[in-house]
Image (cartoon, rainbow, N blue to C red):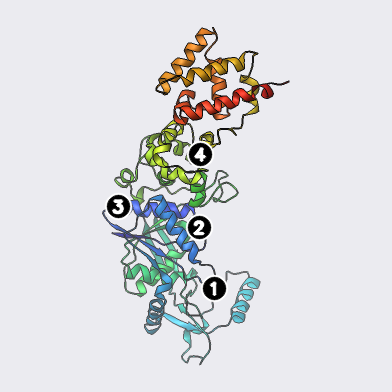
Amino acid sequence: MKLRFAPSPTGYLHVGGARTAIFNLLHARHYGGKMLLRIEDTDVERSRQHHAEQIVNSLQWLGIEWDEGPIYQSDRLARYRERAEELVSHGNAYRCYCTVEELEAERLAAERAGVAYRYSGRCRTLTVAASNEPYVIRFKVERGSIDFHDLIRGDVHFEGELLDDFVLLRSDGHPTYHLSVVVDDIDMAITHVARGDDHLSNTPKHILLFRAFGVEPPIFAHLPLILGSDRKRLSKRTGATSAEEYRDMGIVPQALFNFLTLLGWSPGGDREIFSKSEAAAIFDLSDVNKAPAIFDEEKLLWMNGQYLMRMSPEEIYPHLVPFLPNPAPAYELLALIELHQKRARTLREMAEQMRYYFADDVAVEYEDDAVRKHLKGEELADRLRELHDTLAAIKPFDVVSAEAALRKLAEQHNIGAGKLIHPLRLALTGRAVSPPVFDVAAVLGKERTLRRLSRLIDQVPQLTAP
């Protein structure tokens, strides 16, 4: 068994394309087959090399491995021309010398007559070539029904007489999608073609081409559309549309892979979190739903949060680095990551929550609401000085010792521990909400904790001034 993912490099990797790649990979892995990556870049006007590189990078980031490729169609132009001429020689295709103006005239005539336009086929019967005149090569579509079984849609039927004599080779010598994809699928021994159902109308043409080349068509599986929250085709209006955008939002690749796998397929039961290998063990294209899938971004954020909670700090670190203002070595940040990994839904959120760690100790910004709520009482500055001295005397400086010392001091003054905990949190993070403050102090270390607390003590008069 051999499948392929064959994107056109006309933009970033769309999440629909990413799902197609995932489904191809999982089906291949389930049956011990292979997957090939093919870059379909024969559209000279729209294809860009940098988009091809971005697609490859996005696939690698997502954890989609291929066994062959990437193969670029632009390297195989001579092969497409050779096979097009072969069809001409066997009577399955012909050279068409009609000009753009002549074809437009035919189209306008069809519109005036109120009928669907189809090429008249007048070049089908030419016996003498027009010397030095540009031409395209068209496939000679014969009448008759075209039937095939789709793994997702079931039995599909098309009427051959509704098809045009479609172009295989353009006048500039470049192949159309129809020719290049079929020639490649034959040469690369593709057994299964899983692609979006926007290609369904192309499939009867491709089946005719396979048969003209004397080859049995592969097994097809046309994947349903992905719709946005508005039940319309996924677009930038309802959310991000490319894998790169979700990476930049702070989604980890394992979560996006898991989420996209569930768009149109289910492992059964209530289970929603699973690894790539666990999905491959049970995935089959024939189990994909016919109905369009809904892209629920809120669910993706929830799922990403689940992954962040379950990953080790060592696993999170390389994904988090691009979001940090001043990346530090892993050994310095692992404890900090552990503090925040259950409090954020995205890497970007986590980096924002960790901002206090990277701030200059003498320039921590205090939230106005936290200042108004927690900096109260005439004795506040004196109590914070006592807290500073108490923490300075702790050896070793750790979570347990720091908490015990603060609570003992609060008890001596007959006040609730919160009267000291909240100002300490404000001093260390500038915020009213954070991970447990003693954990924060331990991560910052004794020296930085005392320096930040001293700065708040100095700022109390002006922060509490009416």
Q: Using the image, determine if residue 105 lies above or below residue 9.
A: below
Which numbered tag is attached to residue 118? 1
| Label 1 vs label 3, nearer the camera | 3
Of labels 3 and 2, earlier in sequence is: 2
For label 1, the crowd category at 10 Å Cα-Cα, with few meaning under 14, some 14 to 19 and many 20 or more, is some
Q: Using the image, determine if residue 79 lies above or below residue 295.
A: below
Of labels 2 and 1, earlier in sequence is: 2
Separation (CA) of disc 4 from disc 3:
36 Å
Separation (CA) of disc 1 from disc 3:
42 Å
Q: Circles 2 and 1: CB distance less than 8 Å?
A: no
**Residue 139 position within the rendered picture, expressed as x and y whole percent measured from the top left:** 44, 76
Q: Would you identify the image quadrant in which residue 304 lies? A: top left
Separation (CA) of disc 3 from disc 2:
25 Å
Q: Is mark 4 on a helix, strand or loop?
A: helix
- Give the residue at mark 3: 29
Residue name at image x 46 percent, y 44 percent: 321
In terms of depth relative to the viewer, which is nearer, 395 or 210?
395
- Give the residue at mark 4: 351
Q: What residue type is labelled 4?
A: Ala
Residue name at image x 35 percent, y 39 percent: 268
Of labels 1 and 4, earlier in sequence is: 1
**Quarter the C terminus occupies:** top right
Q: Give the side of residue 339 with respect to residue 33, left or right.
A: right
Which numbered tag is attached to residue 12? 2
Q: Circles 1 and 4: CB distance less than 8 Å?
A: no
Give the tally of numbered discs. 4
Q: Using the image, determine if residue 380 lies above or below residue 425.
A: above
| Label 1 vs label 4, nearer the camera | 4
